[in-house]
Image (cartoon, rainbow, N blue to C red):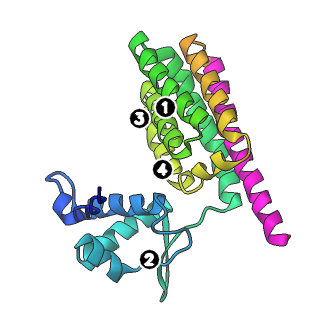
Amino acid sequence: MPSAAPVSPPSVAALRGVNHSLHDEVAARLRALIFEGELAPGGFIDEAMLCERLAISRTPLREALKVLAVEGLVRHEPRRGCFVNQVTEQDLDEIFPVIALLEGRCAHEAACNASDADLLALETLHERLQAHAQAGRIAEYYAVNLAIHEAIITLAGNRWLAMVISDLRKILKLARLQQLHAPGRLAQSLAEHLAVFAALRARDAEGAEAAMRTHLTRQRVALRELARARSARLLA
């Protein structure tokens, strides 16, 4: 059978809702393009092309780029234009200890707050995570991994923690998927998640906090190993 013709996504303008400004919708679309790699790290942001693609004018696009600049996803260079930011090794060294501390605290609070129904929902997510890990489906694994982190943050019930973590994760999302490609990292990540869940199920707040900190810290180690391997290949 002939393959179906690709369906073009609706323009941002067509998706605009009553309660959202157009530049918020544009910012959301640009984030997706960055996280999906269509706007590559370090790459120039072609405003004319994006205006045509998203069926918008320059004004909402530039307002959206200001939002992304505040979030650290893009940067503006005078007389040159906007570029997608690249996450440096120093950025990662500075961010990971902070987010490990914050998400560790979320796990602590979640262990205190989670109901039996909450734990059952988390168990289902971990079963899906394990299935993706065993099949080597990294993209799918990462999606469920993200859902688990978000669920734990929600269970913590602390909006200030959630807000700060959300801001930091927008930066880390530029690099975190890569760490799952490090040799043995997928299995290690799964084991770490299962350790966090075991502590949550046991209502062990301190154990959950420690396990989550370990999980985030080892992500940084995996990214550092990948960076070293890339450097070695370039020098070979």
Q: Mark 1 points at which residue?
A: 148
Among the 4 quarters of the image, the one containing residue 137: top right
Looking at this view, name the residue that lies furthest to the front. Answer: 1
User: Is residue 208 found inside the magenta-colored segment of the image?
Assistant: yes
> What is the magenta segment's predominant secondary structure?
helix
Q: Which of marks 1 and 4 is in front?
A: 1
* Horizontal side, residue 8 vs residue 143: left or right: left
Q: Which residue is drawn at 17% across and 51% down?
A: 19
Q: Distance between the residues labelled 3 and 4?
A: 12 Å
Residue ID for mark 2: 45
Q: In which quarter of the image is the C terminus?
A: bottom right
Q: Which mark is residue 167?
A: 4
For the residue pair 196 and 203, the one nearer the viewer reads as 196
26 w.r.t. 135: above or below = below
| Percent x, y of residue 97 | 67, 43
Label 1 and label 4: CA atoms lie apart by: 18 Å
Q: Earlier in the sequence, mark 1 or mark 4?
A: 1
